[in-house]
Amino acid sequence: MRTSTNGGVRRDEKVGTLVKDLAHDVSSLLRGEIALARAEMQQKGRAAGRGVGMLAAAAAFALVALGGSLAFVSLVLNGAMPAWLAVLLATAAYAAIAVALAVKGRAALQQTAPPTPEKAIQSLKEDIQWAKTHASSSSR
């Protein structure tokens, strides 16, 4: 069987060999795309983890706000001001910290949404478009 090359394209080759090569190339391409998607999802997972951590810290500070304000009132401010004002000030301070952490945590979680591998999807779309372009130009 005679084979010649024309710009890297093999001519007069058995169809079975060409199909085998195509299957190998497609398999390699898909493995690369899956690796890209996996890496992208891991990166988004780490970012979501930071947001969840901030929300957990906000919850902890909210609990501290309750306990801390009661202790603060009973030990320090009992004689300096009315008890209701002492409870209000201590609770407001801890609540402000909890709200700030909750807002930051929520913003961090929203930046990671949607949890899809967007770069991998875009790359796969480009690969499909490239294949369509080359398939239509090869059939001419």
Image (cartoon, rainbow, N blue to C red):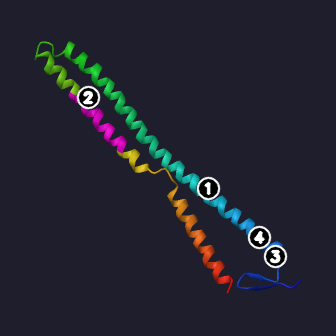
Amino acid type shown at disc 1: Ala
Q: Residue at x 18, y 15 (%)?
A: 76
Q: Are marks 2 and 1 in contact (CB under 8 Å)?
A: no
Quarter of the image holding residue 132?
Answer: bottom right
CA gap, disc 1 to disc 4?
A: 21 Å
Relative to 93, 134 lies left or right: right
Instruction: Please indicate whether residue 123 sits to the left or right of residue 56 in the image.
Output: right
> What kind of residue is marked 3?
Val
- Mark 2–mark 1 Cα distance, whole angstroms, equals 44 Å
Q: Circle 4 sits in a helix, a strand or a loop, which is it? A: helix
Disc nearest the viewer among 3 and 2: 3
In the rendered view, would you say 72 is above or below 93?
A: above
Whether the residues at callouts 3 and 4 have beta carbons within 8 Å, the answer is no
Identify which amino acid the numbered label 2 is placed on.
Tyr
> Where is the N terminus found, in terms of image quarters?
bottom right
Q: Which mark is residue 15?
A: 3
* Neighbourhood count class around disc 4 (C-alpha, 10 Å): few under 14, some 14–19, many 20 upward: few
Mark number, residue 35? 1
Vertical comparison of 124 with 110: above or below: below
Percent x, y of residue 115? 49, 50
Camera-near label (3 vs 4) is: 3
50 to the left or right of 39: left
Query: N-terminal of the two: label 4 or label 2?
Result: 4
Q: Residues within 10 Å of mark 1 (few under 14, many from 20)?
A: few
Q: Residues within 10 Å of mark 3 (few under 14, many from 20)?
A: few
Label 4 sits on residue: 21
Q: Decide: is 28 above or below 82.
A: below
Q: Nearer the viewer, residue 4 or 139?
A: 139
The residue segment tinted magenta is: 92-106
Q: Which residue is mark 2?
A: 94
Q: Kindly identify which numbered label has been placed on residue 126.
A: none
